Amino acid sequence: MPVRNAAIAAIFDEIADLLEIESANPFRIRAYRNAARTIQGLGADLRVLLDQGEDLTQIPGIGKDLAAKIKEIIDTGSCAALRKLHERVPPALSDLLRIPGLGPKRVGALYKALGIRTRKQLQSALQQRRIRNLPGFGEKTEARILEVLQADLQKKRHFQLVTAAGYAESLVKYLKDTKGVQDVIVAGSVRRCKETVGDLDIVATARRDSPVMDRFTAYDEVKEVLSQGTTRTTIVLKCGLQVDLRVVPKTSLGAALQYFTGSKAHNIAIRRLGQRRGLKINEYGVFKNDRRVGGATEKSVYASVGLAYMPPELRENRGEIELARRGPLPTLVQLPDCKGDLHCHTRASNGGNSIREMALAARAHNLQYLAITDHSKGSSIARSLDERRLLAQWQEIDRLNDELEGIYLLKGIEVHILEDGRLDLADTILGQLDLVLGSIYSDFGLSRAKQTRRIQRAMNHPHFSILADPSGRLLEERGPINVDMARVIHEARNRGCFLELNAQPKRLDLVDSYCQMAKQEGVLISIDSGAYRTSDFDNLRFGVGQARRGWLTPADVLNTSSLGKVCKLLKRTMQ
Ligand code: DGT
Ligand code: CA
Ligand code: CA
């Protein structure tokens, strides 16, 4: 799991912060910021890439200098450049930068004039009205910062699912390897496959004499132990992620899992159902007049209120309880149901591997077909394909299809949907492909009406197959475009085309609620890796998680079909 990537990105971000406080060269600052973002979004573990002898400068935005620093961080756990900066700028200052309204200039001024390094010091200076007289500040600024600071104290940082799940899986392995420990299960938002995660909740059972809590607090990545008890311990990892571990008796395991998996809204609804039946449901069990009537398994908790077991991804109080009361729950799509992947890149555009390498990796992930969909020439992306290079790519695909067993390559492209809805490659070319993905790579800020019309027009193109990255969002970076998604989905149905759920951790786009909408309209969703390198196929599981949150069954997903059926379905859109 790409656990260390987050740590490397954090170091680069911190360097950028401190450089900014020092008013260093803006290009230098931006280089660190961009690299941090790239690393965060990378599917592959940098440590693994290095071990495999890969050239990190192949990654966009990573030059020689940054590649060397990445290696240094992986080898030594830290970075001399950061240590040097710390000699000049107190590390705590970078935290002050995160307060809205406090740019590097102001943070620098607060430090130089008043020696303020921490939020606490800032808060007391604000309360003592010592800040209003500094140049560049005033009474209004003072009041605003105080307000933001107080609101910020209540907010919690969030982590991408891939990062949180990576830490969770390592911890589970570590805890399981402890004397007397029986079950160790990740609950909370990670178990529900939520795209971002506030903290980790782990539920375990253990023999009475097991040293599980001591082992937990001794974990290599622990920064701080917030509290330690025999049933509950809370730690903070070096990356800032908080982890709660609860150790419960076997008889309560189901109840504890159900409770700590949440969501809170779902739990409240379940508990209310219980109350109506005279039952008390909590993290210890299900009780009738203080007598235990369930709680050893999650199934027993749901059975006590007359419901079938519910997959965690459904537990959001978005109608799943009513659905369960009406009849059997849908059998949600699972990773092995996906037979192919309809979106990936190769070295021909901005991917990191050859077509052959991608094909073999897809096969190793039990996929039977893979569409090669490099960027077309109109996109601003480096090395995108023009007609001539595309023809050469087709020849190579034909050769590989002759040669390789067990994996079939489809000829595709990811075209750029222009501002007016046109596609950026000639019809004569598009007509010869097996599929055409269309995505938005510019003009994210169009009005709702214009953006909706733009996509409708693109979909109306006779060769359009799949709307890729439908909302264009990048977690922590860019919000979704403003678009009437209901209309887009309706248009897709009329046109017989499809929407994608891109499984890249920072995309997970289409989002769950729109998956539900597409399902209702009968529009199939293609769960794709959008892979840029061979290791990105690992991300498919997060796409499946998001699809399950959107209630999708195998029948609602395009790439659960056999190759023959997918080709037929794609032909329908290609006319
Ligand atoms: P997160 O950590 O913000 O990503 O989201 P969760 O869902 O993991 O929330 P968290 O860690 O605050 O709590 C874990 C679970 O514990 C939550 O999903 C449901 C349960 N829980 C927490 N507080 C309450 C509560 O006040 N009432 C009930 N019924 N359940 C709660
Ligand atoms: Ca949590
Ligand atoms: Ca928690």
Image (cartoon, helix red, strand yellow):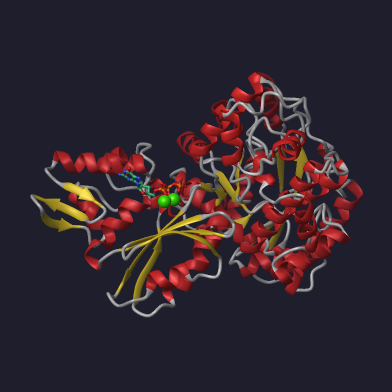
Spot the residue most to the left.
289
Residue 283 image offset from top left, x and y in percent: 26, 53
Asked whether, in this view, residue 162 is left or right of residue 425, the answer is left
Residue at the spot 74% in from the left edge and 33% down from the top edge: 106
Residue 384 image offset from top left, x and y in percent: 85, 47
State whether residue 467 appears in this view: no
State which quarter of the image contains the C terminus. top right
Above or below, 60 against 117 in this view is below
Asked whether, in this view, residue 201 is left or right of residue 433, the answer is left
Residue at the spot 34% in from the left edge and 63% down from the top edge: 229
Residue 561 image offset from top left, x and y in percent: 54, 54
Residue nearest the viewer, comparing 145 with 293:
145
Picture mark count? 0
Residue nearest the viewer, comparing 294 with 308:
294
Residue nearest the viewer, comparing 377 with 114:
114
State which quarter of the image contains the N terminus. bottom right
Residue 326 image offset from top left, x and y in percent: 26, 40
Asked whether, in this view, residue 532 is left or right of residue 275, the answer is right
Above or below, 168 against 414 in this view is below
